[in-house]
């Protein structure tokens, strides 16, 4: 994640309160909308349990399919710069609700943990209210994957989540901060401050509680979230998961045609493409 230096500088001068908010890099201005790429969409207003007003885009399937998907985007900016990861799914019969976390895009509030979990809950409630007959998957990328794991670990039965897709998941917030700081002398000086970051919501501590089909992908060339963190996450699964070797930079997996097809195969029958799982 970018600006880890800023993250550590901020908690060095401000103390330990609300440190999780420093992991989020929201932008309110939209770069584009689905209309710019000829895609039908609808603006959706949601309300979290604490009253925070949230915004999402509904991308309806172009033909009837059995799946709806909640898309939890990566860090920085907002759904306007991330939705191209999923804009191909409606043509494949998969409807998508692309959520902006609080503080991102047109969503109110400030992103921090655990408040953001209420945003995910609001999106799932909307999907169940409007499409109760559909099967439900969550696709999380980067920090979206990190949010997905602890939420689903606690809520998979309550919200009838049928499958999870994780692209470039981080295992530990502290480890990601240290990775980002390791590239400069100043970063090494701030390294001790990473121990102040909370570990309660680290995905590695929750991944073993997922009892549903899981597809995980990560690129060995990812310079933001180290590939080894994805491998560690996959190794902690207690269910038979699917692993895909991605390629290219951070969260570029779904621009690769073969990986798109593998995701669709996973949704169809929870089967895996013929890719080796990490040891």
Image: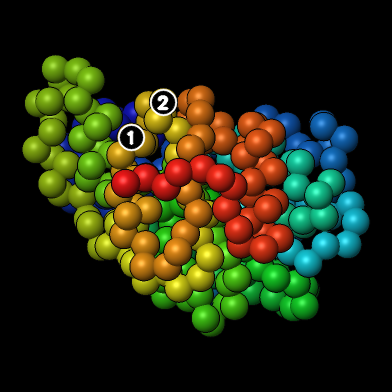
Question: Can you tell which mark lies on residue 226?
Answer: 1
Examine the image and state in which quarter residue 96 appears.
bottom right
Q: Are marks 1 and 2 in contact (CB under 8 Å)?
A: no
Q: Quadrant of the N terminus?
A: top left
Residue where numbered disc 2 is placed: 221
Q: How was this image coloured?
A: rainbow
Q: Is residue 65 above or below residue 131?
A: above
Q: Earlier in the sequence, mark 1 or mark 2?
A: 2
- Please say whether residue 111 is visible from this viewpoint: no
- For disc 1, the neighbor class at 10 Å (few under 14, some 14 to 19, many from 20) is many
Front position in the image: 171 or 17: 171
Q: Residue at x 58, y 40 (%)?
A: 78
Q: Hey, which residue is sitting farthest right in the picture?
A: 63
- The x, y position of residue 203, in whole percent, is 34, 57
Q: Residue at x 31, y 59 (%)?
A: 236
Front position in the image: 268 or 207: 268
Q: Secondary structure at mark 2?
A: loop
> 171 left or right of 31?
left
Examine the image and state in which quarter residue 115 appears.
bottom left
> 246 left or right of 56?
left
Examine the image and state in which quarter residue 58 appears.
bottom right
Q: CA gap, disc 1 to disc 2?
A: 8 Å
- Please say whether residue 239 is visible from this viewpoint: yes
Q: Is residue 134 above or below residue 204?
A: below
Q: Residue at x 57, y 77 (%)?
A: 159
């Amino acid at each position: 994640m970018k600006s880890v230096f800023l993250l550590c500088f901020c908690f060095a001068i401000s103390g330990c309160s609300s440190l999780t908010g420093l992991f989020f890099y929201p932008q309110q201005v939209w770069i584009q909308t689905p209309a710019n790429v000829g895609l039908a969409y609808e603006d959706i207003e949601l309300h979290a349990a604490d009253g925070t007003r949230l915004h999402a885009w509904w991308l309806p399937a172009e033909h009837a399919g059995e799946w709806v998907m909640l898309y939890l985007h990566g860090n920085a900016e907002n759904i306007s710069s991330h939705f191209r990861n999923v804009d191909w799914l409606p043509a494949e019969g998969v409807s998508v609700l692309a959520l902006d976390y609080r503080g991102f895009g047109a969503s109110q509030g400030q992103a921090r943990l655990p408040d953001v979990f209420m945003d995910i809950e609001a999106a799932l409630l909307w999907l169940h209210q409007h499409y109760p007959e559909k099967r439900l998957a969550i696709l999380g990328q980067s920090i979206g994957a990190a949010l997905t794991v602890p939420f689903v670990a606690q809520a998979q039965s309550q919200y009838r989540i049928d499958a999870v897709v994780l692209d470039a998941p981080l295992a530990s917030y502290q480890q990601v901060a240290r990775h980002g700081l390791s590239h400069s002398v100043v970063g090494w000086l701030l390294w001790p401050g990473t121990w102040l970051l909370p570990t309660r919501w680290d995905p590695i501590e929750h991944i073993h509680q997922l009892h549903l089909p899981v597809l995980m992908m990560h690129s060995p060339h990812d310079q933001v979230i180290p590939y080894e963190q994805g491998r560690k996450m996959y190794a902690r699964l207690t269910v038979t998961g699917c692993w895909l070797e991605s390629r290219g930079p951070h969260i570029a997996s779904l621009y690769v045609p073969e990986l798109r097809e593998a995701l669709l195969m996973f949704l169809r029958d929870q089967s895996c493409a013929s890719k080796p799982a990490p040891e």
